[in-house]
Amino acid sequence: MNTAELLARARLLNRDLAPGEPLAETVIRPLSAAVSEDEPAITEDGSPAGRLWELAKDATRLRAMPGAHQGLIEATAALQHLACLFAEDAGRLGERISELAAIQGGLEPGIDVATDGPYLVTNVSRVTTWLGEPVQTFPQMALCRCGRSATKPLCDGSHARAGFSGAKDPARVPDRLDTFEGVQVTVLDNRGVCAHSGLCTDRLPAVFRVGEEPFVAPSGGRADEIVRAVRACPSGALGAVIDAHQVPGPRREPAIEVSKDGPYRITGGLPLDGDASREHYSLCRCGHSRNKPLCSGMHYYVGFADPPPSPEPTLFEWAGGLPALRRMTHIFYEKYVPQDDLLAPLFARMSPDHPERVAAWLAETFGGPKLYTEQYGGYDHMVAEHAGKALTEQWRARWAQLISLAADDAALPTDPEFRAAFAGYIEWGSRIALENSQPGAAPAPHMPVPRWWWVCEARPGSRVSALAPPAPPVQVAIPAPGHQVGFAEHIKPLFRAMDRTSMSFAFDLWSHDDVAEHAEAILRRLRQGGMPCDGAWPAEHVDLFARWIAEGCSP
């Protein structure tokens, strides 16, 4: 088997798989660049799905050989993805991924940057969304770098059609390390590799000062807070020195985070084009960085955006996902607990991963992935953690008080809707833990991890903030006498997205059937001025709604 034969087989399969030439851009194009000899004349039997799987395995065998061409690696990534899409079920998918992983198991994990093409990611099993939710991985992947792929984060060949260039901009910010000396900490800053994520300026604005010179004021914060901000910098632009010694960076498992509307955030020392000197760095995902492949923050200026989030987010999503909850629990156990006379002795012997465990529990409880159940044993394990500890109300109340302060420090959302739900769970959950810890307590076994939700359906966007600028009035064309009032054209536009959200616990204001069923009750509320909650409708809109009812509630 050689690359030329692989290409010939791909051409035959492309003809037989499905309309639209599914292999043309992602397999045949890169393979063609890797082939220098003539393609052999071949024929193949068997089903297209079976041939695809065999082709993926053979491509992986060639890719595993030393000196594999970038085009072959890119094509292998696409073939692995497509072959796994044809797996009959989750069990067969796992078997296929394991078989492919075994074939290329001798390759070192890492990321290679294809010339004017995608990131070629080898043997990296942990890729997550910005919320910490796992993304399906394959032993060989090609991640989009041009920002145009329709299958993000995977590459679909759009870079070739768009003429994407991976060249650096000569006018980029210079790669230069600046030093800012403080009383306790000296901060190092390289603007040339900064991705402008804003984590440092948002969380420690007295030290990292937007629009001021010098940018860094090391005496503006506590040493532990500065070190925490430096270690959290996703681009690796920041460093810290204490007593002439460089503060060590975090040590993490290799992982890739697909950040929201921004770059890939790499952690765990994954080599980039063979260079393993960085523990963490940020790679451009929008295609417009001035410092490719590293992110330079251009995604903000070009309006790069992922698909919009759900209009009805879970508490997990609204909080910022697992990264935000981890940030909060680490601040709680590293900053607040050690200096507290009540809690410090209680947690003196906690396991090193205790903050991760608590974050995983909260993530699952708030509607996120079932991380605590899958990794730590679920509800029964949490009950066992508290059994026999005879916690006191003083301990419980202090824990609840300080976790709320940690939520502030971690920049969790401060809107009343989220904080009501957050505080509600902290009170409920801590009192359940207190109860379960008492001598003789017999909690019900084998219960599921609880799922917490918005308090009384009060969700973000269900009301107008008193600090929000005035909204423009709703404009609806009122039909002339003799013309029928229709729901889609005249009634639905009267109800704003906020109105719909605020009433979603009862019915859908954008559904003709729901509004028609409850029309008389809605009309009474409109005439009384109790709906919507932020101010009565103009009389002509109320009259239009009444007219729609009188005419038979036309769709």
Image (cartoon, rainbow, N blue to C red):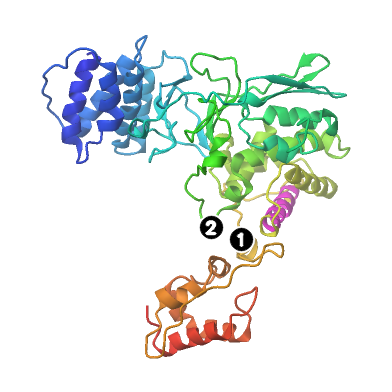
Mark 2 highlights which residue?
A: 312
**317, 113: nearer the viewer:** 113
Secondary-structure class at tag 2:
loop
For the N terminus, the quadrant is: top left
Kind of residue sitting beneath label 1: Arg
Q: How crowded is mark 1: few (under 14 residues within 10 Å), some or many (20 or more)?
A: many
What's the residue at 63%, 63% (across, down)?
458
Task: Find disc 1 in the rendering and name its residue.
Answer: 459
Part of the protein shown in magenta:
419-434
Q: Could you tell which of marks 1 and 2 lies nearer the N-terminus? A: 2
Image location of residue 512, percent across then percent down: 41, 75
Toward the viewer: 44 or 226? 226
Gap in angstroms between the C-alphas marked 1 and 2: 8 Å
* Residue 541 visible in the current orientation: yes
For the stretch drawn in magenta, what is the main secondary structure? helix
Image coordinates for residue 260, horizontal then vertical, percent: 54, 41
What residue appears at the point 48 percent right and 80 percent down from the top-left corner? 518
Pointers 1 and 2 in contact (C-beta within 8 Å): yes
Give the amino acid type for the residue marked by disc 2 in the picture.
Glu
What number is the disc on residue 503?
Answer: none
Q: Where is residue 207 in the image (x, y as percent from the top left)?
A: 79, 34
> Can the viewer see residue 348?
no
Magenta stretch holds residue 237: no
